[in-house]
Amino acid sequence: MMKKLISSLLMAFVCVGAMAEQDTKEYKTFVKNDHHVFYCTHNGIHVVVDPTEGGIFEPNITVINESGHDFVFEPKKIKAYAYAIPGINSKSARYRTERFLAKGDTLGFDKDELVVYTPEKYSKKRTKTMWWSDFIGELVVAGVESIGTNDKRTEYWNDVRRDRRIQDAEDARQLEKARISEGYWRANTIFNYSEHEGFIAIKSVHTQYLILDIPVDGENFHFLIDNNKKY
């Protein structure tokens, strides 16, 4: 009898714990430029995830505080995941779960944690990518310019245009560094009746659906972002 009572109490404890872990917050969308923006309001805190500008791998996140108190928001604690098919290690197929998720079927899938870049690492990655793109483009243009008449006047103007392209590319890289430095989410105290916004960058994978866990003031806001969700 005592064993049955203890067993029943343990089962009740497990069930209550499972219920406590369920996310009862209500998640909604609004429309921006024909696409859906995802948001949630809970205990006076509003969290908005806007993937309409940078896509799901560079989402803009806004936190609005109407909770009645101040708190520190630490974006480095944000976690990003993609659904994956268990047992399939091929990266070309691992994230192809769209037909199941479109029906709301998430049972049996794994969740793979994705890399969320620091501002510094993302700045290096972006500018390096831009440099290689510009370098390859310059090789192509130089090859085209080398075809034809190579008189001194033509060579001079080719050099002028080349220098201008190199300077324009460097200016673009500096603008990108400034954009990341100014716009990337960093830790901030969010005072009552104030808001902060910024973006984070996530290493891209083959997926239509991105899961974002955003901890704000002791609560976890759990978003399922649909990359193709249009109005």
Image (cartoon, rainbow, N blue to C red):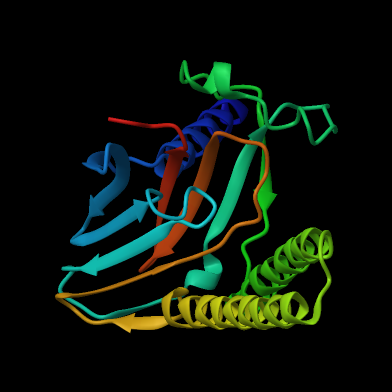
Q: Is residue 206 left or right of residue 101?
A: right
Q: Residue at x 50, y 80 (%)?
A: 175
The residue shown at (67%, 26%) is 96
Looking at the picture, tell me which residue is in the foreground, 48 or 16: 48
The answer to which image quadrant residue 117 occupies is bottom right
Please state the horizontal and vertical placement of residue 120, each as a whole percent of the image: 63, 80
Quarter of the figure with the N terminus: top right
Q: Give percent across and percent down for residue 114.
A: 66, 52
The residue that appears at 73% across and 75% down in the rendered structure is: 154
Residue 56's place in the image compared with 141, above or below, is above
Q: Position of residue 170 (x, y in %)?
A: 62, 81
As displayed, is residue 211 above or below residue 92?
A: below
| Nearest the eye: 92 or 129 | 129
Residue 174 drawn above or below residue 150:
below
In screen coordinates, is 145 left or right of 188? right
Instruction: Report which quarter residue 130 is drawn in.
Output: bottom right
* Residue at 46% from the left image edge and 55% from the top image edge: 54
Give whichever of 220, 84 is nearer the camera: 84
Quadrant containing the C terminus in the rendered view = top left
**x and y percent of residue 34 in the render?**
27, 37
- Quadrant assignment, res 21: top left
Q: Foreground residue, 157 or 72?
A: 157
How many numbered marks have been drawn onto this rendered protein structure?
0
Q: Is residue 5 above or below residue 178?
A: above
